[in-house]
Image (cartoon, helix red, strand yellow):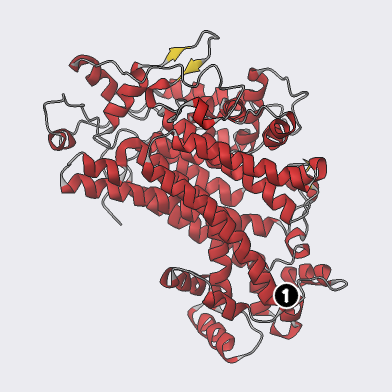
């Protein structure tokens, strides 16, 4: 594990000074926010969730304040902000204890839905409606929350951050409608002429192309003041959080078509409401709009990260379809070994999962039995399952988290061009890797808990068909793999091979999972990945945002909704 980095308040340098000198100019860690101010912020966030709203807004024309409150309430409820036990206080420790991760970024999250709505405008009414459909319902917004918290945790660690912050604070202005325009980072400015783009967005028409790209120069005293504002979230990072949610929702639109899901977040799914064709086109449109917003971040490293996420989502879905077909043919293990993969990584991950919750002697017997007996799950089955989990769920979280760090001035390309000292370059690499490792493991833990909840939750609590929904889709998730491993005499391989489509197959598998240690071992595997995620944060200096990420990690494996 790389050594923990000190948080530095780095003074920006004038144009005449080498950046390598600025890189070594480290200041003391900023003081922790006053306790009274922090308590007030927590109380304010908790006040937002007293009614525990769980329904759609009363109408699509709800005020922005109502929308903001709904978004905040859903996310805060998810993370236990209203839990009386969690609000009990004790003497203040040296490091802050974060009861509600939402409280640190509540203002950014509260505006997320309206900002995304502006990005998704279309001149075609049907496309406009379907693209925004899932954003009308309350979501947990876990992915944007992670992006924003990681941004806050790492901002100020790069010697390039003060210049970025100066750009952001120097040139925010108001449009004639009173709407804030963040021209500073160029996030709303097209790179090509509008006549070439031919892309009409009625919500952005008053913004695009109307702004100057010139930024005023700061004097030394103003620059020093900006450098002290460590942790301020940049406009590019807020836009990244919005892009992340757009990609996620696009995947939901496509998934609900593939899975023929009737419900999503407790309401009719998009295919149920609009049909498959519009749902597919709506998802494609979301990806298009996300790609436009991504390009306007003007960071090739970030574009590469998020573009590969879109490819990963498709690869994960295809892998799931192929694994189902292979299971039907009784050849899942050979399919797992033939798929493109980073073999060393996934083989070790599969072996860990295969033996999770077993003693050393039990683990060895399980491996021996799997390799010597036909029709038993092998480590390759678990490797395939975890790789698919990464591609479909964790890749978006991991790469968007790394992208938030890149936008904080820690990107490899930006650091290289700045000609900073090798030691600084290594520190920035450690931060990028820590962010990715946190997001990757948190994402895997999140999906493992999701798969576990499918065997425990009702449709009313889960917001979508549950109580074996994955089984009805023919999916053999971790609880099934563990039950299959533990109960060799139950011929579970036959249920898996026919995708649980036989009469009574789903009910039988539910009973077998309940008889086994499948749910317990799945929970242990989720906790192991959550532990790894927290361990990756060790490289970051202590801060409220870091503690919020730790708290978020804990809440993911304890969630009930």
**Residue at coordinates 52% horizontally, 49% vertically from top-left?**
396
Q: Residue pushed farthest front?
A: 195
| Percent of width and height locating residue 31 | 31, 27
Compared to residue 165, the image places residue 280 above or below, namely below
Image quarter (top left, top right, bottom left or bottom right) of the N terminus: bottom left
Horizontally, residue 478 falls left or right of residue 126, namely left
Q: Residue pushed farthest top?
A: 176
Horizontally, residue 3 falls left or right of residue 356, namely left
- Report the front residue among 205 and 481: 205
- Report the front residue among 89 and 62: 62
- Report the front residue among 299 and 327: 299
Q: Which residue is mark 1?
A: 496
| Percent of width and height locating residue 239 | 48, 32
**Residue at coordinates 37% horizontally, 39% vertically from top-left?**
299
Asked if residue 213 can be seen in this view, the reply is: yes
**Residue at coordinates 49% horizontally, 71% vertically from top-left?**
352
Compared to residue 522, the image places residue 546 above or below, namely above
């Amino acid at each position: 594990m790389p050594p923990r980095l000190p948080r530095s308040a780095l003074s920006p340098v004038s144009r005449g000074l080498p950046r390598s000198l600025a890189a070594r100019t480290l200041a003391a860690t900023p003081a922790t926010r006053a306790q009274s101010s922090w308590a007030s912020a927590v109380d304010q966030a908790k006040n937002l969730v007293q009614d525990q709203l769980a329904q759609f807004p009363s109408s699509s024309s709800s005020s922005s304040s109502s929308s903001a409150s709904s978004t905040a309430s859903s996310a805060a409820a998810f993370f236990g902000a209203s839990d009386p036990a969690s609000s009990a206080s004790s003497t203040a420790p040296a490091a802050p204890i974060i009861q509600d991760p939402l409280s640190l970024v509540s203002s950014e999250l509260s505006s997320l839905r309206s900002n995304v709505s502006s990005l998704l405008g279309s001149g075609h009414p049907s496309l406009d409606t379907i693209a925004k459909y899932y954003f009308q319902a309350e979501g947990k917004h876990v992915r944007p929350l992670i992006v924003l918290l990681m941004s806050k945790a790492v901002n100020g660690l790069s010697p390039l951050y003060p210049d970025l912050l100066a750009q952001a604070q120097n040139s925010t202005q108001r449009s004639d409608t009173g709407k804030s325009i963040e021209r500073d980072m160029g996030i709303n400015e097209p790179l090509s002429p509008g006549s070439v783009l031919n892309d009409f967005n009625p919500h952005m028409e008053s913004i695009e192309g109307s702004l100057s790209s010139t930024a005023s120069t700061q004097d030394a005293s103003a620059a020093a003041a900006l450098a002290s504002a460590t942790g301020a979230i940049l406009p590019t990072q807020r836009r990244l959080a919005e892009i992340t949610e757009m990609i996620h929702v696009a995947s939901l639109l496509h998934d609900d078509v593939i899975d023929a899901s009737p419900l999503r977040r407790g309401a009719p799914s998009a295919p149920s409401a609009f049909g498959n064709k519009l749902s597919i086109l709506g998802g494609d449109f979301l990806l298009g709009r996300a790609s436009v917003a991504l390009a306007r971040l003007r960071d090739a490293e970030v574009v590469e990260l998020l573009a590969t996420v879109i490819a990963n989502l498709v690869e994960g879905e295809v892998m799931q379809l192929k694994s189902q077909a292979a299971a039907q043919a009784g050849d899942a293990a050979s399919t797992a070994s033939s798929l493109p993969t980073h073999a060393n990584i996934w083989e070790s991950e599969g072996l860990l999962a295969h033996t999770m919750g077993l003693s050393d002697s039990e683990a060895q017997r399980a491996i021996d039995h799997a390799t010597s007996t036909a029709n038993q799950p092998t480590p390759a089955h678990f490797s395939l399952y975890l790789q698919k989990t990464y591609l479909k769920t964790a890749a978006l979280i991991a790469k968007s988290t790394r992208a938030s760090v890149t936008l904080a001035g820690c990107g490899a390309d930006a650091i290289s061009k700045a000609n900073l000292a090798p030691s600084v370059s290594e520190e920035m690499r450690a931060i990028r890797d820590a962010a990715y490792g946190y997001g990757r493991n948190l994402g895997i833990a999140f999906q493992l808990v999701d798969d576990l909840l499918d065997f425990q939750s009702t449709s009313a609590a889960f917001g979508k068909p549950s109580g074996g929904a994955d089984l009805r889709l023919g999916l053999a998730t971790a609880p099934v793999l563990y039950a299959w491993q533990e109960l060799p005499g139950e011929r579970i391989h036959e249920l898996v091979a026919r995708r649980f489509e036989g009469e009574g197959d789903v009910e039988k598998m539910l009973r077998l999972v309940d008889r086994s240690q499948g749910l317990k071992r799945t929970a242990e595997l989720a906790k192991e990945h959550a532990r790894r995620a927290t361990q990756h944060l060790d490289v970051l200096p202590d801060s409220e945002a870091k503690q919020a990420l730790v708290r978020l990690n804990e809440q993911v494996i304890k969630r009930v909704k």
